[in-house]
């Protein structure tokens, strides 16, 4: 048996099925943007809080909102945007 470089059953990801394809709708993006911005703002406005660094988790929803793509949505096949 020849080795082709890809495991059995693996599919090549190309086109709109790739990990960074737009898969988030407007409401989803706005909610992520607001939550991410609020967490980042709390990081700067609450300097004496214990576990203050946990506010930095707001970078994740903020980044995914700005990209319009959620890698977890891609893995699970979820799309909240309108399809053509």
Image: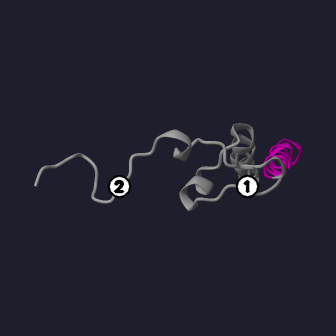
Q: Which comes sooner in the sequence, label 2 or label 1?
A: 2
Q: Which residue is mark 1?
A: 80
User: Which stretch did the figure color magenta?
Assistant: 28-48
Snapshot quadrant of residue 44: top right
Front position in the image: 68 or 38:
68
Snapshot quadrant of residue 22: top right
Front position in the image: 64 or 20:
20
Above or below, 77 relative to 32: below
Residue at mark 2 to residue at mark 1: CA–CA distance: 25 Å
Which residue is found at the position 28% from the left and 55% from the top? Answer: 7
Place of residue 21 in the rendered image (x, y in percent of width and height, measured from the top left) = 60, 42
Q: Which residue is mark 2?
A: 10
Above or below, 50 relative to 62: below
Tell whether position 55 is magenta. Answer: no
Q: Secondary structure at mark 2?
A: loop
Viewport quadrant of the N terminus: bottom left
Classify 10 Å Cα crowding around label 2: few (below 14), some (14-19), many (20 and above): few
Classify 10 Å Cα crowding around label 1: few (below 14), some (14-19), many (20 and above): some
């Amino acid at each position: 048996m020849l080795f082709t470089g890809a495991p059995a059953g693996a599919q090549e990801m190309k086109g709109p099925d790739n990990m960074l394809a737009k898969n988030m709708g407007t409401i989803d993006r706005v909610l992520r943007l607001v939550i991410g911005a609020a967490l980042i703002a709390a990081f700067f406005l609450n300097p004496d809080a214990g576990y203050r660094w946990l506010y930095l988790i707001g970078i994740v929803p903020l980044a995914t909102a700005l990209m319009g793509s959620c890698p977890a949505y891609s893995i699970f096949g979820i799309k909240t945007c309108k399809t053509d």
